[in-house]
């Protein structure tokens, strides 16, 4: 279904590769001070960007559209339990995110000559998929809080600054000092740490990353549930 | 036996507006019931309560004896709603297949699509369908699970003559096959053609619940119009079975189900009747006399 919306499939599958081509390929052959390949490091960063994209735009815009088109009303009257409908959407998004990651990593390997053991990439992929929970919640929150016209703008306004400030496109060390100071408080920063540390280039322990992500999940989930309940009251109470 | 649908003293308030003001209604297995009423009477609200899409402010709604949101009740119902949508990127057949998967023993997809008269559009994306075709798609989605009960909110709205006939024929066939069908309409004629029981809803209350024949006997069937030599007033018609009386200068228009009696009385009261016309009342017009009280 996502395939049939080029605005979604192209953005989510091709954009990370396009950005990686501009930001990553030129420096892919270099190594960091700790010996980790910068190519691999940036592939992990753009992988985080890709999964965040799928979740925030997919759910943010998707749910807003569903509400506007009153798809929710028909689904609500069908025998399909709302929770199953929601979980099915999450599962589809995870499959789509997996595909985006495999395309990106495949592109890095074939075009950029960036190689890592399969187990390392498997770890990066598994962590990025499992760690995407806060962004799924954020996507739902955006979808329930904004109309279909506002949702893309809201998603951009929230996600792009987060992605830039967390070193998805340019390593954190090269960002302006005040951004560097903010970065460690952002969910996207700790999310990317999951992938970077799988390569041995993380700057915090896995436990720290997970704790931050769990905290943000709680916040975004509370926001999403609140918005969802408000909608419930207005439409189905 | 447990009724398929039951509303008990159901009330629904939206802010200041009381959409339903105590509705009692039980619909048994195999009935074909038309909820009839003008726009805004509370038909859609009634259906929403029956399906658990809305919670009653007071009273109770039961579906197959369960809470209407209960899975055991839901999987036995097919639903066609006003103001609902589907994704536009799936084709008609894909959507029908998707909805079939929600039911324990659905119809073959082709059968459901044919019942809605959409065979020619099966491979087309829902987003490109015309308004009438979309309406037929919703009908296909309602019937594809082969449910025991069907809830059709204004099933023929936006359909052309042919589409309307196809849907009405399908509804009759489904009813003949033993399905319980609840539909809403604001066309008396449609309710009359289809249903064996008509529930007239007006301003959130059931004002009539009877067979089409009984309903029609209660509404004035003839329109009388004539000119008078001298101006007449409401008093002239006191005690006569007339409704929707309109007096304009020398022109009188009224509805009655006993035109002979009215005319006889008028002659006796010495009213000069000229240019007399007695015609069958327009059903819609007659129906309005039932639902709009001064």
Image (spheres, coloured by chain):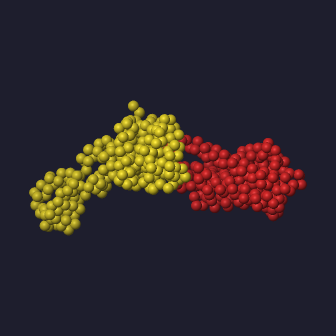
- The red-tinted chain is A
Residue A121's x, y, as percent? 78, 46
Residue at 59% from the left image edge and 55% from the top image edge? A5
Residue A65's x, y, as percent? 56, 55
Residue at 72% from the left image edge and 59% from the top image edge? A18
Is B205 situated left or right of A148 in this image? left
Residue at 82% from the left image edge and 47% from the top image edge? A116
Tally of numbered discs = 0
Report the quarter where the N terminus of chain B lies.
Answer: top left
Q: Nearer the viewer, residue B81 or B115?
A: B115
Q: Nearer the viewer, residue A150 or B255?
A: A150
Residue at 68% from the left image edge and 54% from the top image edge? A13
Check the image and name the residue furthest to the top: B1
Is B290 situated left or right of B58 in this image? left
Q: Nearer the viewer, residue A1 or A169?
A: A1
Residue B108's x, y, as percent? 47, 39
Residue B8 shows up from this direction: no
Residue B173's x, y, as percent? 36, 40
Residue B111 shows up from this direction: yes
The picture quadrant where one finds residue A61 is bottom right
Report the quarter where the C terminus of chain B lies.
Answer: bottom left
- Figure colour of chain B: yellow
Is B42 situated left or right of B124 in this image? left
């Amino acid at each position: 279904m996502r395939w049939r919306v080029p605005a979604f499939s192209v953005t989510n599958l091709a954009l990370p590769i396009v950005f990686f081509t501009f930001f990553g390929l030129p420096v892919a052959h270099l190594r960091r001070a700790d010996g980790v390949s910068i190519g691999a490091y940036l592939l992990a960063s753009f992988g985080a960007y890709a999964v965040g994209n799928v979740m925030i735009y997919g759910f943010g815009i998707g749910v807003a559209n569903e509400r506007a088109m009153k798809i929710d009303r028909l689904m609500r009257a069908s025998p399909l339990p709302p929770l199953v409908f929601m979980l099915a959407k999450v599962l589809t998004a995870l499959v789509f995110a997996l595909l985006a990651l495999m395309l990106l990593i495949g592109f890095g390997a074939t075009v950029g000559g960036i190689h890592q053991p399969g187990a390392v990439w498997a770890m990066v992929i598994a962590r990025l998929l499992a760690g995407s929970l806060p962004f799924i919640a954020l996507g739902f929150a955006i979808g329930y809080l904004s109309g279909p016209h506002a949702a893309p703008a809201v998603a951009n306004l929230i996600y792009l600054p987060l992605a830039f400030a967390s070193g998805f496109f340019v390593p954190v060390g090269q960002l302006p000092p005040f951004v560097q100071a903010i970065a460690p408080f952002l969910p996207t920063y700790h999310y990317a740490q999951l992938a970077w540390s799988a390569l041995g280039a993380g700057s915090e322990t896995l436990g720290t990353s997970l704790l931050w992500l769990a905290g943000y999940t709680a916040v975004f989930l509370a926001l999403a549930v609140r918005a969802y309940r408000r909608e419930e009251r207005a439409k189905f109470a | 036996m447990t009724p398929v649908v039951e509303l008990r003293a159901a009330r629904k308030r939206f802010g200041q507006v009381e959409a339903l003001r105590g509705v009692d209604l039980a619909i048994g297995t195999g009935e074909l019931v038309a909820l009839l009423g003008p726009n805004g009477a509370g038909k859609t609200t009634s259906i929403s309560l029956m399906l658990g899409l809305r919670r009653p402010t007071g009273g109770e709604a039961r579906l197959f004896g369960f809470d209407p949101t209960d899975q055991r009740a839901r999987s036995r119902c097919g639903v066609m709603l006003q103001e609902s949508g589907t994704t536009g990127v799936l084709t008609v057949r894909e959507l029908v297949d998707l909805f079939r998967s929600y039911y324990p023993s659905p119809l073959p997809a082709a059968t459901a699509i044919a019942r809605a008269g959409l065979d020619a559009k099966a491979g087309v994306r829902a987003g490109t369908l015309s308004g009438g075709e979309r309406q037929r798609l919703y009908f296909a989605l309602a019937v594809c699970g082969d449910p025991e009960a069907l809830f059709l909110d204004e099933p023929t709205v936006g359909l052309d003559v042919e589409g309307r006939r196809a849907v009405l024929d399908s509804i009759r066939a489904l009813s003949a096959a033993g399905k319980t069908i609840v539909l809403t309409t604001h066309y008396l004629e449609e309710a009359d053609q289809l249903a064996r029981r008509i529930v007239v809803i007006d301003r959130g209350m059931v004002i009539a619940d009877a067979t089409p024949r009984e309903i029609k006997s209660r509404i004035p069937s003839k329109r009388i119009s004539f000119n008078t030599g001298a101006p007449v007033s409401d008093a002239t018609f006191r005690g006569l079975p007339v409704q929707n009386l309109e007096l304009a200068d020398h022109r009188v228009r009224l509805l009655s189900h006993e035109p002979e009696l009215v005319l006889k009385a008028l002659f006796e009261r010495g009213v000069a009747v000229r240019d007399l016309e007695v015609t069958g009342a327009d059903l819609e017009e007659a129906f309005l006399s039932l639902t709009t009280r001064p």
